[in-house]
Amino acid sequence: MIDQRLYEEFRDIGRDIFVTGMTSSHGGNMSVRVGDKIIIKRRGAQLGRLKRTDFVETSFKGKDSGIIRASTELIVHRAIYEKTSALAVVHAHPRTAIVLSLSRDEIIPIDNEGSYLLRKIPVVTVELASGSKEMAEKVSDALQGYKVIMQRGHGCFAVGQTLEEAYAWVSALEEVSDIILEHKLMGEEMIEYRKHSEGYKNW
Amino acid sequence: MEGWAGKILDIDLTSGSIETLPLDMEMARLFLGGRGLGARLLWDLVGPEVKPLDPENALIFTTGPITASSSQTSNRFNVSTKSPLTNTLLHANSGGWWGMQFKRTGYDAMIIRGKSETPVMISITEAGISIDDASDLWGKTVFETTEALGQDRNKRNVLCIGPAGENLVRIAAIMNDKERSLARGGAGAVMGSKNLKAIVVEGKEKNKPADKDQFKFMLYETGKLIKASPLTSQALPEFGTTVVMNVVNEIGALPTRNFQESQFEDAHKISGETITDTILVKNQACWACPITCTRITKTASGEEGEGPEFESAWAFGAQCGVGDLDAITEANFLCNDLGIDTISMGNTIGCAMEMAEKGFIDNDLRFGDATKFKELIRETAYREGLGDDLAEGSYRLAEKYGAPELSMTVKKLELPAYDPRGMQGQGLVYATSNRGACHETGNMLGPEVLSLPRLIDRFATQGKAGIVSVHQNSAAVIDSLVYCKFSAMAVAEEFFARTLTAVTGQLFTADDLMKVGERVWNLERLYNLREGFTSADDTLPDRLLNVPVAEGPSEGFVANLDPMLVEYYQFRGWDENGVPKPEKLEELGLAELVQPVM
């Protein structure tokens, strides 16, 4: 079962995601892969107030009863672990990124740090939200080429070798999105300062 | 060529035949090149009935699809064979210029089998490919041979063995471009067993990218990241690989006096900072590398050459309790000249020092005494006196004199410069590495010490198996492309995937590459299982498992291997005996390959 070090990582990152407004009280979820198991947040647990009893250990691939207590998005997490080399997955609802996803097929950072870290964040459209097979397939496919992706109008999925790394991509995505939105609201022409930045379009 | 040249050179030294074989492009896509392609070819060519020094063993030199493309660090190449030191599959790779030059001859790989009756060398130039008499070179050192054959950095490059390889020393290296080495596991002895002294290459063909614009963009973006990383843009150029000496020592993970301690009181005397301040003449770079980590150094007595790298400085330094930088550096130079792996040499001398101090061998060798380094290295290369035992490596030496527990080896390969008691993940890397104890097959220095990509608790065990596996798979990919591991400390797999896509014109995602890495790792595992290795070989020296570190930042810790190993087998989709499950082999496309034998 989850050890103290891993629990503290879940708890602290869950708290950070909630207090920075990147999810509502009971939204978002996180998981890590340990051996042939997944440790994932319990369905209905508050991300900002995770207790040691708020986790479910379930199999990586096979079927087990853990599924009835696990996060609704378990199917997506499983698909991501199956198709990518991810060891941790964070799903959150960063608001500005969601706003941008409503009118864009990709989010291309305009700030220097965001360009350096992310270059491009693809946006995927899913008809049936929350835990559908379609969502699992599209999200996991998109994550084969990117560390963080947006699901249009819903939220983001990020992967890493640790929860901290996945969280870092979520946090960077929202900062990138805030800057894009604020620059757009300002209404001024951008002075391009990045050599070969047109290449990010094809990233 | 766009990535792959599509050809393999096949040379039989027994018959003298030289043939060109087509590269199986499906095999190339599944295993890429370098270490992956080497493992795949070795699987077919060298079965368990072949002993490492038999003529039937093959020496397989491989490049990768990005080699010679001018992508940053695309200079490296690989050799695969069965190791005379470990009896495992062996892969070793090297930088410099030779790999790039060999690729320019229009071949992806070269298989060398059989055994010549007399010493020979191979020439691959525009004039043709020939096997020539090398009787006059036999007995010469690496530096003498390299000079005699006309090494010319960008035009003509020499790969050879020194006396150690000729004398079948089990820790003999193959050297290229004078002072670069395919160091570990005794590939030099395999070359010596074939009476093959040298391979000279001159090439003109270009590895031109299929998508020039995308390739240029990737060059720019990759360069930006290498410049932005403090490791690749500041630490390595300024201090070389020994930049980590003080860092590893400070956390209590620098093995000292044959792993009896984990901190060395004189670490600062052999650190990157001291090298830069005292003996550094200039930096040097391999072909197409902006990092320039190579040190050209000069000792007080006037000896000048390449090194020491971190592992070499540790092996003759902390491992032997020696803080004399000149003595360490000159020992390194001599190993290069005689063609010996510095890690195994220094580690084995450290083992001999402990054996002498504890009375297992009758010798006045003592920790801290560097005066016998040169004598011992020469004796090893020529198999004289105690050197004849040292030439067998640490395990056989310690076993012969009744103290196998003093050998710091895994699968008979000498451990490198990290104490697993202070870096738990590194212990799992050593225990499971397919070529024996090796940090290069999944180095956890990044996540456990340097915060790359994020700092993880170095003493923790839960979840560590996954991170180790991912790093092992990633290392297998880098070794198959073939890139330098240092570029990977600044650039993630997605950059490699996009560059590979631009070079070959075939789409590769980051996860496609990681799957290649997993495939290579599993094939190597299968090779070793076919050789008779079992899960019992996935272990560490008893000292590391059962003797806690006495003092310092790692005080009280042992290598907590068992729980990590259980998690590791589960993560990898192997059974409790460490055998890949059928569904895993199916997933990786290896099921048909192993069906007749497993």
Image: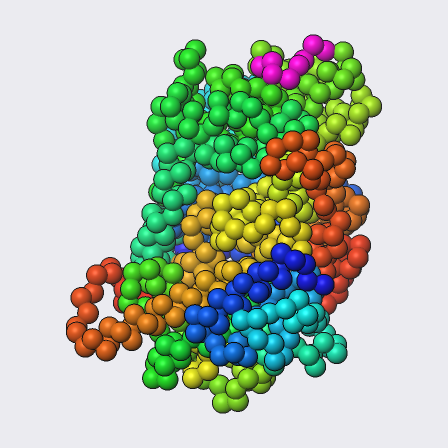
Along the line of sight, which residue is nearer the eye, B578 or B149?
Answer: B578
Q: Position of residue B593 (x, y in %)?
A: 70, 60
In the orientation shown, which residue stands out farthest toward the right? Answer: B402
Q: Position of residue B405 (x, y in %)?
A: 78, 30
Along the line of sight, which residue is nearer the eye, B370 or B206?
Answer: B370
In the orientation shown, which residue stands out farthest toward the bottom? Answer: A127
The residue under the point 67% across, 51% down is B461
The magenta-colored residue range is B363-370
Give the number of marks. 0
The image quarter in which residue A162 lies: bottom right
| Location of residue B523 with respect to B408 vertically, above or below | below
The image quarter in which residue B351 lies: top right
Along the line of sight, which residue is nearer the eye, A184 or B517?
Answer: A184
- Viewed as shown, does residue B38 lie left or right of B499? right
Q: Position of residue B564 (x, y in %)?
A: 71, 52
The image quarter in which residue B262 lies: top right
